[in-house]
Image: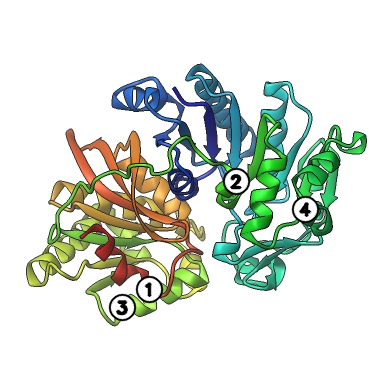
Amino acid sequence: MPTLGAIADDFTGATDLATMLVARGHRTVVAVGPDALSEGPGAAAVRHADAVVVALKSRTAPVAEAVGSSLAALRALRDAGCERFYFKYCSTFDSTPRGNIGPVTDALLDALGEHRTVVVPSFPATGRTVHEGRLFVHGEPLDESPMRHHPLTPMRDSRLTGLLTPQTGHPVALVGLDTVRAGREALRAALDAPELADALAVVDAVSDEDLVTICEAAGHLTLVTGAAGLALGLTGPRAEAARAEPASRPGDPGIVLSGSASSATRAQVAHARTRLPHRKLDLAALRADFAGTVAGLVAFARRAWDDDPAKPPLIYAVDDLADLEQSAPDGTTAGPELVERALAACATDLVAAGARRLLVAGGETSGAVVTALGVRTLSIGSPIAPGVTWARAEGRAHGRDHTVDLALKSGNFGGTAIFTEAWSALA
């Protein structure tokens, strides 16, 4: 029976955290939505897990919807037997001025009868650190990094206290690096100080060792919040945790579906275009004839498999941020939603056509693909890069059950060659 329950605000974040938990010795199941904990094959898997991560698509949802789905996940995790909880959000603290990190944290604390927690988005392995309360991305302040141009959640302040204060009803406090470096007991005493009794405590961390100290010092808190890096201190009951066996075999058809507009993914797309067969989404064509355009993309991928099965084709959305701003005839610019819908449709049709390996880039795109494929559970397999892993996904689409290898990549994660090199981890 699981004792640790986590709520992730997007699908890539869920697999990111699950990968960390597996590496720390926890048998871990990713449940797609709270219902997967009590229905279908996921229910049995949960009973044999040490930790369960519920994957939501709530990062950019309206505040009330994000809070509601997070509370539903909490109820399901408590019903499954979990006693400690982890709210996982992005290491770049992706949010709007109103939420959803603050409102969800407040709601979870209230439901648990708790009043305080830690806020730890640091993940040094992926270049995210917090010092003096400011969030840095590969050494650049968040508001000077490419995240300032994010199409859904542009981040224009690197001060976590400034970002979080308008989102929460709790006071926001800062615990500095000097306190963290004083050790676990000193940090725990600081977290337990009367002035932090009702606070969300933003804690500095610039190294993995800092994260271990924070996790150990916060071990008595019912709820912790942060990026996946905070799990470094959560040592599980097994020194070696079994990873899921691949669902596919070398040579099985694969596909890369990229909807992310992040600078990291754009560089990955540019690299892959010189090495893989590729097609770029045509938003105008999709608006004019969605089904026909998707069918053309599927036909392209099938031809690429026939030509060279060793080169998974790439279907992508973005070369430049302006690609998502192409206006429809009615003047709207619903580019991101159209991209998600198109790539999700490609995914279901390609799985029906024989695809057994799918690498998906972008949090929102990953959520759309997982939902379209009817995935209920993800069993964590081989790691690809920090924060990115293969997972054995079981689902149902087009009236047929399927099991595929699925990698969900946050837009900002992975090296430049990930679209061409990820497949070797499945061999």
Residue 426 in sight = yes
Disc 1 element: helix
Residue count near mark 1 (Cα–Cα under 10 Å), binned few <14, some 14–19, many ≥20: many
Residue 393, disc: none
Contact, CB < 8 Å: mark 3 with mark 4? no
Which residue is disc 3 drawn over? 273
Which residue is disc 4 drawn over? 180
Q: Position of residue 72 (x, y in %)?
A: 54, 24
Mark before the other along the chain sequence, 2 or 4: 4
Which residue: 46% across, 32% down?
52
Which residue is disc 2 drawn over? 233
Q: Image quarter for residue 85?
A: top right
- Report the Cα–Cα distance between label 3 and label 4: 44 Å
Q: Which residue reaches farthest left?
A: 306
Q: Is residue 161 left or right of residue 246?
A: right
Contact, CB < 8 Å: mark 1 with mark 3? yes
Which residue is disc 1 drawn over? 269
Give the answer, above or below, for where 315 lies relative to 354: below
Contact, CB < 8 Å: mark 1 with mark 2? no
Q: Position of residue 177 (x, y in %)?
A: 79, 58
Q: What amino acid type is highlighted by mark number 4?
A: Val
Q: Is residue 146 left or right of residue 107?
A: left
Disc 4 element: helix
Q: Image quarter for residue 169?
A: top right
Q: What amino acid type is highlighted by mark number 1?
A: Val
Give the answer, above or below, for where 395 lies relative to 177: above
Residue count near mark 2 (Cα–Cα under 10 Å), binned few <14, some 14–19, many ≥20: many
Q: Nearer the viewer, mark 2 or mark 3?
A: 2
Q: Nearer the viewer, mark 3 or mark 4?
A: 4
Disc 3 element: helix
Disc 2 element: helix
